[in-house]
Image (cartoon, rainbow, N blue to C red):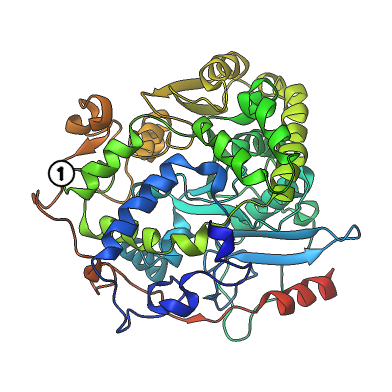
Amino acid sequence: RIDDRVDTNHSILSNQAPSLTMATSKWTKKRPTIQGRALLLCVISMLQSSSAFQSSFQPTTSYAVPHTWKSTGCLHSTARDDSNRMRDIQFSSPLLEEGYPPAVEEYEAGTLKKKPLLVYLPGFDGTWMAPFLQLPELSTSFDVRCLTMSMQDRSTYEELKTSIVDYISKETQQNDEVEPSGSAAEPPKRNFLANILKKKSTRPVYLAGESFGGILASDVALTLLEECPSIDLKGMTLINAATCYDRSKLASMGPSVAALPALLYPFGLLRMLPLFTDEYSWDQLLMILQAKALPSVIDSAQRESFMGRIAFSIPQKLQYMPQGTLGWRLTEWLETGCAKMEARLEHFRSNSNNSFRSLIVVGEKDLCLPSIGEAERLSSLFSNSHVHVVEGAGHASTCGSRVDLAALMRKRFPELKGGRTARGRTVMKPVAANGEGAELGMEPRYDGRDDIGLSPLKYWSKANYRKRKGTKNVLNRSKLASIMDSKS
């Protein structure tokens, strides 16, 4: 059990193998052994099969201006409100944090902020782990940002929504500003939406929401359309949107698990696991393990290295979901958000003037939510929508190996076709698209090898890993909390 080995501030690896954490500055002498390879592949399977057990990413280092809401870093605000509820959320750029060379090069050249902004909103696990395989390819068309929430976070639904709207407002208006240097800038003002500029933003914005994040994305999109005409919201992608939570198996099973006696709670979580899995994840894991194939979106050494670094850092990113956290998120996030959006979804028809575009992606084998039926309902409410069903995918793996999300988005939003490279594909690669069963979405390795994959020793090589210049230790949680409190 992960919670037996991890506390809220340190990872399993923090004392035993600090060279493997993403917070370390360089690849040190403690290099992973061959057992690391098994770890890599096993945790990939965990990502695709256990969304309910995922947790928020809590980095131990960040960048020089971590609370300016800029692409240079992230806001990690930890504070308590009058009810003594912990609020612990973060907006980040995973590709920059994890040293993905193309993204770092664009950032250092000053071109990253010129790309459309894609804001990914996660499921109730609170992490960006579910779509992490898709992030490198998405970065060819977007500046990708992700919201995460720690397991200690007790934000209300409305607080989450307001934070997202404020973040997007701030980011789009800072696009042409000069980044401050020297001492860290002050934290952003609360309720920034009230001070939004009248000038139309020139930076396009796209929203992507998965599961619970689909509720948030729908609500945020309506708010931006109705109240923030200066923001250039181009479209929205919903993945297994939980706007149908009230009619789901999760709603019928989850609250009873959250109410179990403490000693029985872990067994209740195990009973929920089949809601998130599918029949192909293990077979695809074996294909990767045996170097027979890779997901079609992992088609270079840099991308395989990114995948490997994320896998090595899983002990940092994954935490056991406490019983109180499960109960809070089922009630305060899913139940509250679903009820609110049920009354607001009709507004899309009247407020978007038939021009707001949406892409609805669902897993064919989603046992957690009635996603296919909900996709049909949403497409009838959204005046300009398109539905894509990912064959054989379960709830947690819809954005895994069996889809090329960037291609789907380029096809739905044609203005994205150029991208960073000449590829700009709008369909999955032929070999991967023609696969059946576990082979769907998979293709032979990019390097032509079928005996062994890329050595973990190369994950942090100069060719495959690039640390962004100018990084500094982030303020610790207590200090940042005091700053946020003093400014409020």
Q: Residue at x 63, y 67 (%)?
A: 8
* Residue 469 place in picture, x, y as percent: 41, 79
Q: Point out the residue furthest to the right here.
A: 82
* Residue 269 place in picture, x, y as percent: 60, 41
Mark 1, residue position: 292
Q: Residue at x 69, y 74 (%)?
A: 477
Q: Is residue 432 visible?
A: yes
Between 117 and 483, the one lying in front of the other is 483
Q: Secondary structure at mark 1?
A: loop
Left or right of residue 444, residue 281 in this image:
right
The answer to whether 110 is drawn above or below residue 163 in the figure is below
The answer to whether 480 is drawn above or below residue 314 in the figure is below
The answer to whether 154 is drawn above or below residue 267 in the figure is below
- Crowding at dot 1, Cα within 10 Å, few <14 / some 14-19 / many 20+, comes out as some
Between 120 and 29, the one lying in front of the other is 29
Q: Residue at x 37, y 45 (%)?
A: 45
Q: Residue at x 37, y 25 (%)?
A: 392
Q: Point out the residue furthest to the front here.
A: 263
Left or right of residue 305, residue 382 in this image:
right
Amino acid under disc 1: Lys
Q: Quadrant of the C terminus?
A: bottom right
Left or right of residue 397, residue 214 in this image:
right
* Residue 75 place in picture, x, y as percent: 64, 65
The answer to whether 303 is drawn above or below residue 401 in the figure is below
Between 340 and 418, the one lying in front of the other is 340
Q: Quadrant of residue 195?
A: bottom right
* Residue 85 place in picture, x, y as percent: 82, 58
Between 141 and 272, the one lying in front of the other is 272
